[in-house]
Amino acid sequence: MGQKVIRVRNILGERLSLPGGVTRERAVQEAGKRVETLRAPYEEAIAVEIAKLEKIVAAAGPEIAARQLAQLLDGAGRLLTLTGTFGFALLDAVSKSLCDLCVGMLEKSIAATAPLEVHLNAMRLAWKMELSETEAEEMLGELARIHVHYGFEPHKPDES
């Protein structure tokens, strides 16, 4: 017995071919304006997220539990969304490095909080200060050395 083919109407495709609307450039421009209107409250949220991460590590003491590392990873992921959305390149790179560190520590059952504290200090520095390109590269290089010391891959910057 033969199979019946049912064609589904592509309404979006049909509408795209209709005249009117806005150009792609205009839509991107408008979206950028809307994102910028959110900058101030989300910049405050970045400071709050960093403080939450610091609180988790401070509560852990010299050794952190896997549950706390998972909480740290979750918080760093939220921070990563904010830093990427609003173009904070250095803080974004430090956040990615912290995520990679947390994953590596979970995989290898490493409980020392010292490498986390270094990453959080770097995060706070990247947030509060304007660093030169050289200083930023040096900071990221030192964070990568921590990854190597503990035996996992350092974060590789995006190739954009």
Image (tube, rainbow, N blue to C red):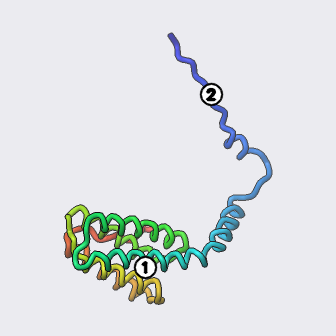
Q: Residues within 10 Å of mark 1 (few under 14, many from 20)?
A: few
Q: Where is residue 124 in the image (x, y as percent from the top left)?
A: 41, 84
Which element carries disc 1, helix, strand or loop?
helix
Q: Where is residue 144 in the image (x, y as percent from the top left)?
A: 29, 76
Q: In the rendered view, does 145 fall on the left or right side of 132?
A: left
Name the residue that disc number 1 marks. Answer: 51
Which residue lies at the image location 40% right of the left edge and 73% below the top edge? 95
Residue 145 visible in the current orientation:
no
Name the residue that disc number 2 marks. Answer: 7
Counting the numbered discs, the total is 2
Residues under labels 2 and 1: Cα distance? 54 Å
Q: Where is residue 134 in the image (x, y as percent from the top left)?
A: 39, 87
Q: Upstream in the sequence, badge 2 or badge 1?
A: 2
Q: How crowded is mark 2: few (under 14 residues within 10 Å), some or many (20 or more)?
A: few
Q: In which quarter of the image is residue 29?
A: bottom right
Closer to us: 139 or 25:
139
Which residue lies at the image location 55% right of the left edge and 78% below the top edge? 43
Q: In which quarter of the image is residue 64?
A: bottom left
Check disc 1 and give the amino acid type. Ala
Check disc 2 and give the amino acid type. Arg
Above or below: residue 139 compared with residue 6: below
Above or below: residue 33 compared with residue 10: below
